Image (cartoon, rainbow, N blue to C red):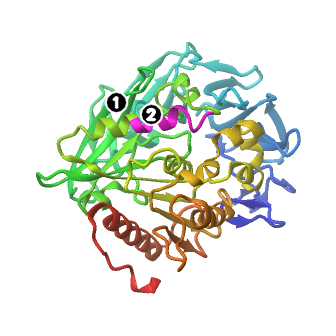
Amino acid sequence: MRHWDHDLGPDQTHLFDTDGPRDLTTEPGAALRETTFDLSADGDFVVTSWRVPGPGAGVRLVLVRIDRATGERTTIADQPGVDLEHPAIAPDGSAVAFTRETHSTPTEPPRITLCCMRFGDDPVQLAGDWDRWPSSLAWTPDSSALIVTADDGGRGPIFSVDPASGTVTRLTDDDFTYTDVRPAPGGVIYALRSSYAVPPHPIRLDPDGTVTALPCLDAPELPGTLTEVTATATDGTPIRSWLTVPEGDEPAPLVLWIHGGPLGSWNSWHWRWNPWLLTAQGYAVLMPDPGLSTGYGQDFIARGWGSWGGDPYTDLMAATDAACTHPRVDASRTAAMGGSFGGYMANWIAGHTNRFDAIVTHASLWALDQFGPTTDGAYWWAREMTPEMARRNSPHRFVADIATPMLVIHGDKDYRVPIGEALRLWYELLSDSGLPADENGESPHRFLYYPTENHWVLAPQHAKIWYQVVTAFLGEHLRGERVQLPELLG
C-alpha cells in the first residue's frame, strides 16, 4: 500500500520500448517495483528482475527475459528463498551476470554473491569464497571479465572477476569508494570516486592500475582533517572508524554519528549526512562501522544479527572510547546521533548509558513490536525480527533509564519508519523517561517535525533547518551556548 514516501494506489511500473512506443510489460502488477534491468548490446532483448509473491506477505525476485520484438517473457532464473537482482548482459549476448541474495532467517543474515548464467545453461555462482558483497557489476566490452564493486574496510574498491574461474582481482587500492563504473575498450575503466576527504569526481583507471582524476569542479575546502581510528571490541574484533577533527589546537567536543541500514558502511561522501558541516562548527565527528556493517566479511555482519542491542552497541562504545584518546578530542563533552537504524542505536544508547551529554535521533525505530508490522517492508524485517528479538532489542523498554536530553526528528511521510515511532517516543520521553516534563510541561527534550518530508529530509530549506536545529541542540548541551533557532520555528 505504501513504499518509502508515497502511496502506491493503482499505479504500476511498466517497461516501455520508446522506439514505437510500445509497452513490453502489460499488466505487470507490482513485478517491476524497485527492480533493475539491462538491454542486450544488439537491442534484441531485455533481462530484468521480476517481483513475485512469496509466502504470506513476502515477495522474492526472479530473472525474466523479454523479447523486444514480440514482448514474450520467459523466466530464466528462479530460486526459492533468494532474490536475483542487478542483471548485466554480456556485450556478446551469450550470458547474463547478476547478484544472488539469500533470504535471511532469525539466526542468519542475508548473503550476497555473484552469479553468471550462459543462456541455455544453469546459473553458476562465481567467487563463492570471496567474503565481500558485490554492490555493482558490469562487463568489459569484450565479455571476458566482470568489473565489480564491493564495500571493503571503509572503502569501496573496484575488482575484476573472471567468469570462467571465478578468480577475483582487486584493481584499486586507495582510500576511495568507486561508483557508476563504466568499462571501456582497451581495458580502461571510467568511474566516479569519493571519500570523506573529497566528493564524487570522475576518474580514468588504466590497465596498469594508474588512476587519473579527470577535469571536474573544484572540491570544497575542508574545515579540518580526516583520520582513521581502530578500536578493539570486547571479543577482540577490530572496529574501525573515520574521524574528522576541526582546525585548531584545542580539544573539540565529540559527536558519535551512527550510520543507518543497518547493512551499510561509512565509506563515501554524502551531501545530506555530511560530517564537515558539524566539523566546521568545531566538533570532532566519529563515524564507526560496528557489527552489522558491510565490508568486513559475513561473520562481522552476523555478529549483530538478531541482537541489535548487543555487539553493535558495545562496538560503538569501544569506538567512542578509542576516539576519546585522540589528543584533539574532548572526552568530557560528547553526543551521539544517527538516522534510521542509526536513530535506533541512538535510542538504545540513551537507555543504556549516561556518558553522552546529548542525543539526536532521526527517523528512528523506537518500539520494535510496533515498527515491524507497520513499516512498508514488514515481510523483510519479519525474517529477522521475531517477537522475542523485538522484545529483547526494543529501546522503548528502557525509557525510564533515559537521563540524557534528546532531540527527536521525523518526517510525516516516512513510510519506512512510520511517524508513529517518533510520536510514541516523544510521548514516552515526556511522561516516562528519567527526564520527564515538569509540572509546567517544560522538558529538555525537543521534537523537530516535518509534515512534508519522508525518511530523508530532501528540500534544501528543510535540510538547512535540520542542521541549524541540530547544531543549536548540540551547542546548548555540549558548550552551554544558547543558539537562536531559525525564525521559521517560532
Q: Residue furthest left?
A: 249
Q: CA distance from mark 1 to mark 2?
A: 8 Å
310 in magenta: yes
State whether residue 298 appears in this view: yes
Label 1 residue SS: strand
Left-right relation of 12 to 291: right
The magenta segment: 307-317
In the depicted view, which residue is nearer to us: 125 or 490?
Answer: 490
| Residue kind at label 2, given as amino acid type | Asp
Residue 324 is situated, as x and y percent measured from the top left of the image, at 27, 41
Q: Quadrant of the N terminus?
A: bottom right
Q: Main secondary structure of the magenta part?
A: helix
Residue in the image at 30% along x and 28% along y: 209
Q: Residue furthest top?
A: 165
Residue 482 is situated, as x and y percent measured from the top left of the image, at 30, 75
| Dot 2 crowding, Cα within 10 Å, few <14, some 14–19, many 20+ | many
Determine whether label 1 and label 2 are within 8 Å by CB. yes
| Residue kind at label 1, given as amino acid type | Ala
135 in magenta: no
| Dot 1 crowding, Cα within 10 Å, few <14, some 14–19, many 20+ | many
Label 2 residue SS: helix
Q: Which mark is residue 315?
A: 2
Q: Quadrant of the C terminus?
A: bottom left
Residue in the image at 67% along x and 52% along y: 367
Q: Which mark is residue 231?
A: 1
Residue 398 is situated, as x and y percent measured from the top left of the image, at 59, 49
